Amino acid sequence: MLASISTLVKFSRPHTIVHTTLAPTIISRAILRYVDQDATNHYWDVLPIAIAFILINVFIVGINQIYDIPMDKINKPYLPLASGELSVESAWKILTVVLVASVWAISYATSPVVFGLWLYVLVVGTMYSLPMIRLKKQWLSVAIAITTCRGLVFPLCLAVHLAGKVGVAALDVPAVRYILIFSTLWALNISIFKDLPDTLGDSAESIATLPIKFGLTAVFRGCLAIMVAAWASSSIEFIKSMSGTASISTMVLHAAVRVAQLAALALNACLMQIDKRNSAGLTAFYTKIVWGFMYLEWLLLPLWF
């Protein structure tokens, strides 16, 4: 039983689910605080939408693993399909249940915009991996797919849904603008950085990623620049939106956090300069630093707004 649960957890790629779980909670809190309403009842409004996106996230990463078995045997041999821990037939059964459950959950959306955005994520996420289309074969289509789905559409969908429930425009909420700026740039960074540890398998399958086209060093530095741009642009939005309402202590704390983040990034980047061809080191940087800082951004948001 425990082995089956462990296999399912690995198959669902939990580091992506953490983000998909944090976002609804933080966005809901930000919007409800903006309109000064009690959060208790409204969390139930956004819960089905959050569940629908969590499930569709599992569906998309599952489809990707099914069609990436040859590459994953080189790049990610620990994944359940690549290791033989899970059969392809069982994976399809899991994904069928997940997709049906996601359709059921999204049926609670009252806005056609929300349903349309969910459908966009489903279609693009599926096209990302399907052999006859395989968006992931070109770096530009990968960047567009991941950046729009994870960075823009998902948080915007949640914001539009809940903002409509409480009678405000989603983009009037400063926290929503802040989130969209940061998450879009950070998702762009993820779409590029995720390929850095995987050059061997991608090259074997003729996947034209940026690290293969331009080299590890140039792409690594580009990703660091995007991370800094995400922090800078979101901080500018914070200052513009909250300069008249946020306390001096909040402004100082925000600046201190940014300095600490930049210092941590610089330290880890210096360590990575030693051996960027170490796939395990790049994977650790990607999962712990890139994704870790995204989690931290969501967790810190209640301090700013």
Image (cartoon, rainbow, N blue to C red):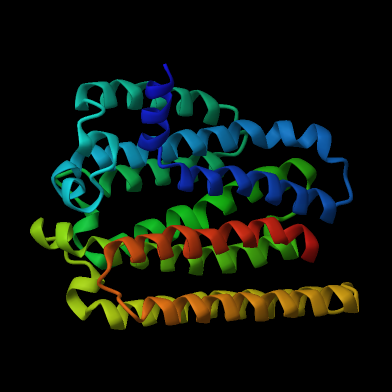
Query: In the figure, is residue 40 to the left or right of 293?
Result: right
Q: Is residue 107 above or below residue 120?
A: above
> Which residue does the image show at 36% across and 67% down from the upper left?
193
- In which quadrant of the rendered image does the N terminus lie? top left
Query: In the figure, is residue 79 to the left or right of 6?
Result: left
Mark yes or no: residue 194 visible: no
Q: Position of residue 250 (x, y in %)?
A: 84, 73
Residue 162, quarter of picture: top right
> Which residue does the image show at 35% across and 35% down from the upper left?
11
Q: Is residue 228 above or below residue 300?
A: below
Residue 105, quarter of picture: top right
Q: Is residue 7 above or below residue 263?
A: above
Mark yes or no: residue 117 visible: yes
Q: Position of residue 109 (x, y in %)?
A: 59, 33
> Which residue does the image show at 44% across and 53% down from the upper left?
149
- In which quadrant of the rendered image does the C terminus lie? bottom right
Total marks placed? 0
Q: Position of residue 239 (x, y in %)?
A: 76, 79
Name the one closer to the observer, 147 or 212: 212
Q: Position of residue 246 (x, y in %)?
A: 87, 72
Q: Is residue 302 above or below residue 222?
A: above
> Which residue does the image show at 31% across and 60% down from the upper left?
280
Name the one closer to the observer, 83 or 237: 83
